[in-house]
Amino acid sequence: MKLSKIAFQVSKNAPANADTVNHKLLVQAGYVRQLMAGVYTYTTLGLKVLRSIENIIREEMNAIGGQEILMPALQPKENWVTTGGWDKIDVLFKLKSRTDKDYALGQSHEEIVTPLAKEFINSYKDLPLALYQIQWKYRDELRSKSGILRGREFFMKDMYSFHETQEDFERFYSETKAAYLRIFKRLGLTAKVTEASGGSFTEKVSYEFMVLTDAGEDDIFYCDECDYCINQEIAKVKEGDKCPKCGSPLKLARASEVGNVFDLGQKFAKDFEVTFTNQAGEKKYPIMGCYGIGVSRSMGVIVEKYNDEKGIIWPKSIAPFQVEVVSLSGAEDYALKVYETLQKANISVLLDDRNQSAGSKFAAADLLGLPVRLVVSPRNGEKIEWKERNQSESELIDLETVLTKLK
Ligand code: ATP
Ligand code: MG
């Protein structure tokens, strides 16, 4: 793509209302636009990042047997009354139609997926079943802040699983936990797994995936020596206490929850009368689990972790392009040739062909944060300046070497 043709450009000025690094950098670099508090547009470049995150999640969910579906965000009141959520869930957005009918906007999809699965689940042979989607969620959050970390409309991956036995649920629960750790690793995030109390309907323990960042809203106690980690909300420990697992002193830090997994038990199956016939011919309720990942929040957390004073430093796995070619005045033709050569070699590349000074192009490249910057300048003849976003040194190499290095 050519930067001159992209509708949303990097800006010299940071947004005035930004309270976090992700908000400031994502808006300033042109990846998102804020419509109102907690509601954002993803521009062409921002959407590329979101889609890459989404695809990593999709690959890992498919690998553990998840089947992707897409459920409606507009939902009938009745389903929410059935589970008690209509009165109990304070973040539920409720709407009225002009014919006085009540609707909810999906804040989570147990109320939709459970009656949906009822159609399919008849026998133990139909289990286990894991359905997931990647979609907008709506929540009437009291305070929507920290850029895309807490939205009123935000992108989530939510999966729901149905099992014959508690053992089978436990098996899938741990496979999903392992898949989550692979996802966060591929996204460049170190996620700590904390034990927390269950959701609104269950007393069971749930697990949260936490990434340390001051922009987060959770406080967690963790141990540097082992994997012990617990949310402060339910913890009976304090900073400096001995880790219950290995005895090292516990640390307290701010973190952002990028995902979680819940044991739902039979609550929703009972609400919607979903039953299956087991091998002995008895009618049973399946055991359910639900598994969320904040897709848009993860994008924000990645920016919180990967930046410097000049801008974003995208991990390669989710960068909108792998390379930016910076075309300097007087070298336009050769820059175009370099750009086209990379495109032919199937390397995802952005060309800064805007009519701007070298200085402002360099600043833009740092702000945008693509992994590799290639400067094509009349001073260097056929040589190209190679610089990685996370390094300070650069080198002059020929096009052939550029291609080899990128492959
Ligand atoms: P939180 O404690 O941060 O409000 P939650 O417990 O309400 O999260 P879930 O309902 O389980 O979270 O949603 C699954 C995932 O969706 C969370 O782990 C988080 O990453 C993300 N998420 C939740 N609420 C928001 C929000 N308002 N904006 C962006 N992402 C969110
Ligand atoms: Mg919440």
Image (cartoon, grey):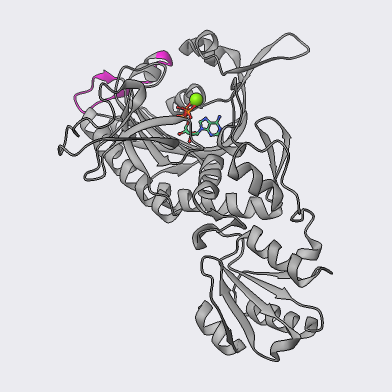
Q: Classify 23 as above or below 138.
A: below
Q: Is residue 120 visible?
A: no
Percent coordinates x, y for residue 345 in the rendering? 60, 79
Magenta residues, dominant SS class: loop
The answer to whether any part of residue 187 appears in the image is: yes
86 or 270: nearer the viewer: 86
In the image, residue 294 sits, relative to residue 55, either above or below, namely above
Q: Is residue 292 left or right of residue 282?
A: right
For the point 73% across and 39% down, the residue is: 16
How far across and down, in percent of the image, does residue 211 sit?
41, 42
Tell me if residue 357 comes above or below residue 399 in the rendering: above
Left or right of residue 195: residue 391: right
Q: Quadrant of residue 310?
A: bottom right
Q: Position of residue 175 (x, y in %)?
A: 29, 43
Residue 379, magenta (yes or no): no
Which of these two is toward me, 293 or 240?
240
Looking at the image, which residue is at 68% across and 30% down? 37
Q: Is residue 275 magenta?
A: yes
Q: Quadrant of residue 106?
A: top right
Q: Residue at x 70, y 53 (%)?
A: 44
Q: Residue at x 51, y 63 (%)?
A: 316
Above or below for 221 versus 377? above
Position of the N terminus by quadrant:
bottom right
Name of the residue lying farthest toward the bottom: 381
Q: Quadrant of residue 344?
A: bottom right
Which percent across, then down, holds residue 75?
A: 61, 22
Question: Is residue 27 toward the left or the right of residue 320 in the image?
Answer: right
Count of marks, rendered view: 0
Highlighted magenta segment, given as a residue range:
271-284
